[in-house]
Image (cartoon, rainbow, N blue to C red):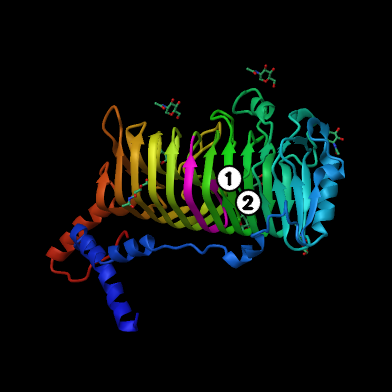
Amino acid sequence: MNKLTFLCFLALLALPLRLADKKHSPRHPDRFDIFSKLDTLEVQEPEDDEFEFLELPNWESDHGSKALLNVDAFGAVGDGVSDDTKAFVDAWKKACSTRKSVILVPEGKRYLVNATRFKGPCAEKLTIQIDGTIVAPDDPKTWDPDNPRTWLGFYNLSKVFFQGKGVIDGSGSKWWEASCKRNKSNKCKGAPTALTIDSSSAVRVKDITIQNGQQMHFVIGRSESVRVTGVKVSAPGDSPNTDGIHITESTNVVLQNCEIGTGDDCVSIVNASSNIKMKNINCGPGHGISIGSLGKNNSTGKVEKILLDTAFVRDTTNGLRIKTWQGGSGYVREVRYQNVRMENVSNPIIIDQFYCDSPKTCQNQTSAVEISGIMFKNITGTSRTRIAMKFACSDTVPCTDLVLNNIDLQREDGAVETYCNSASGFDNGHVHPSADCLSSSALQEKEEVITKSGSEHIIHTEL
Ligand SMILES: *[C@@H]1O[C@H](CO)[C@@H](O)[C@H](O)[C@H]1NC(C)=O
Ligand SMILES: *[C@@H]1O[C@H](CO)[C@@H](O)[C@H](O)[C@H]1NC(C)=O
Ligand SMILES: *[C@@H]1O[C@H](CO)[C@@H](O)[C@H](O)[C@H]1NC(C)=O
Ligand SMILES: *[C@@H]1O[C@H](CO)[C@@H](O)[C@H](O)[C@H]1NC(C)=O
Ligand SMILES: *[C@@H]1O[C@H](CO)[C@@H](O)[C@H](O)[C@H]1NC(C)=O
Ligand SMILES: *[C@@H]1O[C@H](CO)[C@@H](O)[C@H](O)[C@H]1NC(C)=O
Ligand SMILES: *[C@@H]1O[C@H](CO)[C@@H](O)[C@H](O)[C@H]1NC(C)=O
Ligand SMILES: *[C@@H]1O[C@H](CO)[C@@H](O)[C@H](O)[C@H]1NC(C)=O
Ligand SMILES: *[C@@H]1O[C@H](CO)[C@@H](O)[C@H](O)[C@H]1NC(C)=O
């Protein structure tokens, strides 16, 4: 295509959008820009060539140059009772120092492994092939006090591939019973995360199942270029704080074709995370797909460039949620959620700047994490409650540029509505329930007054 044809092509593409936008908001010159900026938001994905090495030959028949390290060869028993921690540590040491090695956790066995830190840096191209089950000791009373918050922790790795049809099982039920959320007479303290990948880059996690986490199931922290595909996470809907996949201080993360059902957020994205893409996510039961919480205890939280494309959310307490505490600072900006189907979701769309997951009530404060540039596009399905869309924003730090495009949320037994506090933005296309409470409609009235009174200059007060 020559340059001119290409330009014409671009202009043609933009035309219907511009017309549609004009029709809905004749007076606001900024809306097209905001709409198209969010509508075309792309997040940078990990470079595929970073993962090229991962296209393994079929090493079962042809190990090629790969060193296959079966944990059984290091003394693992795999009966679910014997302590296999040392065998795993020894296999790790060997694998980490050998190029192109594959640690194999064989199929059909259960390996009991204590809290362990598997540290890099390692020799290049390490694969962890999990086909069997790795199970945690189930008693919180004998848990290793040196690792109160991690079970299987992987640190400082580059170019590592976790894969297999196996299971990582946190045996969490006694931890859940001990949680202060289950039993108010217990002290509130954190429990281990089942799988942690920290301070790493170019990591790929494929197909494994993570279940019954003591608390969170899978944390991706301080890492970049992480691709998670076909991973399943599961725990009972009433297991406390068992987030599915939690992303913190990480960039260029892709979650794709994941199926997550737990007792807390299916996905939670917190501080210092950007360029996160979620594609084809199944969520439920649980608390939905969340950004936050952010700003707890007056902290700063920054999250930007988040894209969710295609999700099915069912039987959850929230659908798409952004939650921040009063008193925080920082921002959530440039987020697009699109093509999401909800079924029996209590709060399908919710921005909550008064989040307070604490036994004490949280006082309102003047400072808050700023929320702007959030697009919801093609979101359909059923709400379990009357308020299908809730934008509860801080009086002093309003939410701005919330964009709703083609929303259809219904309730089987009654009407639905939208709640707004201190929220501005606009809608485009069919939007049900109506989002008239977004305060840009007030802006339009103001503009009308300004225009009528002869001023040609439109003053931007809110957008
Ligand atoms: C695993 O934990 C148990 C219980 O705390 C302890 O007795 C055992 O020595 C640990 N195993 C290793 C290899 O550290
Ligand atoms: C990671 O490895 C580098 C050396 O490659 C080292 O300097 C750093 O301290 C390690 N970090 C951690 C958390 O182990
Ligand atoms: C709550 O925990 C306390 C000890 O922390 C225990 O005595 C009590 O039986 C527990 N209650 C329930 C309902 O499990
Ligand atoms: C947020 O992330 C930044 C950058 O990694 C870090 O310095 C800061 O301590 C984090 N804040 C909180 C509250 O975790
Ligand atoms: C947060 O800051 C506010 C205002 O400075 C103060 O009143 C409050 O006690 C602080 N909260 C915490 C948890 O530190
Ligand atoms: C809140 O932050 C302050 C100051 O950073 C710290 O001293 C305090 O321990 C924190 N409180 C909680 C509950 O995290
Ligand atoms: C709706 O979801 C709730 C959990 O939020 C669940 O308890 C209830 O059974 C679900 N209802 C239907 C009709 O599936
Ligand atoms: C809207 O999203 C649904 C999935 O929830 C998808 O099947 C449908 O194709 C999307 N519609 C458009 C116009 O993209
Ligand atoms: C905080 O402000 C919101 C919005 O104005 C209000 O609905 C809520 O009741 C206030 N909460 C407290 C604890 O004052």
Q: Quadrant of ligand 9?
A: top left
Q: Nearer the viewer, residue 59 or 202?
A: 59
Q: Are marks 2 and 1 in contact (CB under 8 Å)?
A: yes
Identified by mark 1, the residue type is Val
Q: Residue 71: x percent and y percent?
A: 81, 44
Which quarter of the image is occupied by the C terminus?
A: bottom left
Report the disc number at residue 231: 1
Per the image, is 273 magenta?
yes
Q: Residue 247: x percent and y percent?
A: 58, 50
Horizontal relation, residue 258 to residue 114: left or right:
left
Residue in view at x 15 percent, y 65 percent: 451
Identified by mark 2, the residue type is Val
Callout 2: helix, strand or loop? strand
Magenta highlight: main SS: strand
* Magenta stretch, residue numbers: 268-284
Q: Residue 373: x percent and y percent?
A: 39, 58
Per the image, is 219 magenta?
no
Callout 1: helix, strand or loop? loop
